[in-house]
Amino acid sequence: MNKVLIFTSFVYNIAKTRIKADEFDCVICADGGLTVAKTLGITPDILIGDFDSTKLPQCDNIIRLPMEKNMTDTEAAIDLAISKGYTDITILGGLGGRFDHTMGNIGMLAKHLDRDKKVCIVDGSNKVFMLLPGTYDIEKSSYKYLGLVSYGKECENLSISGVKYPLEDYRLPNDTTLGVSNEILENTARLSFTSGKLLLIQSND
Amino acid sequence: MNKVLIFTSFVYNIAKTRIKADEFDCVICADGGLTVAKTLGITPDILIGDFDSTKLPQCDNIIRLPMEKNMTDTEAAIDLAISKGYTDITILGGLGGRFDHTMGNIGMLAKHLDRDKKVCIVDGSNKVFMLLPGTYDIEKSSYKYLGLVSYGKECENLSISGVKYPLEDYRLPNDTTLGVSNEILENTARLSFTSGKLLLIQSND
């Protein structure tokens, strides 16, 4: 019991999502995420949300939140998953539409950034992780692009090899587009940095 | 000569954009932004880009960039606008699609964050500013939601009044969704904070 899938209410490029629900031990829908799950023919195990913009669905396992609260339904769904012991969390969607939600969801990667958890956001065009300082091997995949963006302030001593635009001991601030649109050329790219938080974004046009 | 409009290649909810080109002194298209401008019936004054994914268009005023460079076409377009003396910059789009570009564009708000410039990103659902510490009055508008997200690390002594969920001397970190989905209730909301960088996101569903 480890892998959980969380549906949000907005999934960009939904036709190109390659999510298989049977690879997850639990599926949670955050509020309007239920509509997305239905579109993909997936039945959730748990629904959570304030259902402020959708009718309260018929379902045995609903956690109803108050409308006035200090977090989004997606944050509550992630907290629920963690309280149930899941450490491998995939959030489907939440990278487009209302941009306050988008940035809030990226904040959730920062909130749950530790070595004992793996949290990522995916949609039909993107796969987004946040990384702590360390060394990582990233396998070449069906995603064409690899973007590196500093989250917080800056990442120090950033090196990446096996890619179209290598970097060595680079200080990457959060106000540049330099890390955008890299590409993995070898079977595996090697990435390392010594301080900061790094967003690793794999994407396709 | 002050207001410039920059088209990017991805505009979410384009049908709902309310851009009027004649309110701007100059229109610049960053690469594939030309396709978007054409969709809205707008003819740009300048095209800039590497045109790596589009055919080089017929146009008198093209700045052709190398494909291999340390910035995106959008960053180059903003730099061009600033070099020409524009201080009121509206970027149309760039908040969805490829997420490395999205975060790069938000980084551009941080790069150009000073009191002598006004830079915002708009699309059919969102209007996004980044703010330096200070006090601001925000008028109620046709946008339903007002989201506040700390960019960088945290914002200190954040207060907001005239809204559904007021805050007083709050420390807003970058790993929370607490600032999402606020709403302006009065004619004007008053916002202040003493340190950090704040993303102010007005949006509609």
Image (cartoon, coloured by chain):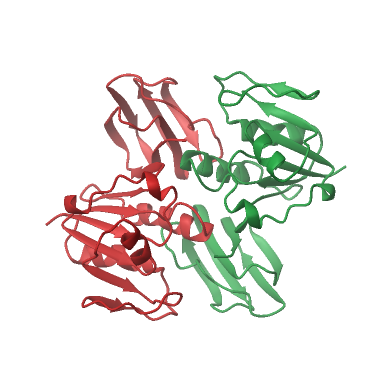
Chain colours: A red, B green
> From the viewer's perspective, is B194 left or right of A189?
right
Does residue B168 appear in the picture of this structure?
Answer: yes
B164 relative to B170, above or below:
below
Q: Which quadrant of the rendered structure holds the C terminus of chain B?
A: bottom right
Give coordinates of residue B163: x percent, y percent.
Answer: 60, 77
Q: Which quadrant of the rendered structure holds the N terminus of chain B?
A: top right
> From the viewer's perspective, is A1 left or right of B124?
left
Give coordinates of residue B55: x percent, y percent.
Answer: 63, 23
> From the viewer's perspective, is A193 left or right of A136?
right
B150 relative to A80, above or below:
above
**Picture quadrant of residue B110:** top right
Front in this rendered view, residue A120 or A5: A5
Q: Residue furthest left?
A: A1
**Picture quadrant of residue B159:** bottom right
Residue located 30% across and 27% down the image? A140
Front in this rendered view, residue A66 or A28: A28
Give coordinates of residue A169: x percent, y percent.
Answer: 41, 25
**Picture quadrant of residue B91:** top right
Residue located 28% across and 58% down the image? A41
Residue located 36% across and 24% down the image? A184
User: How many labels were placed on the picture?
Assistant: 0
Does residue A197 appear in the picture of this structure?
Answer: no
Give coordinates of residue A166: x percent, y percent.
Answer: 42, 20
Residue located 47% across and 60% down the image? A101
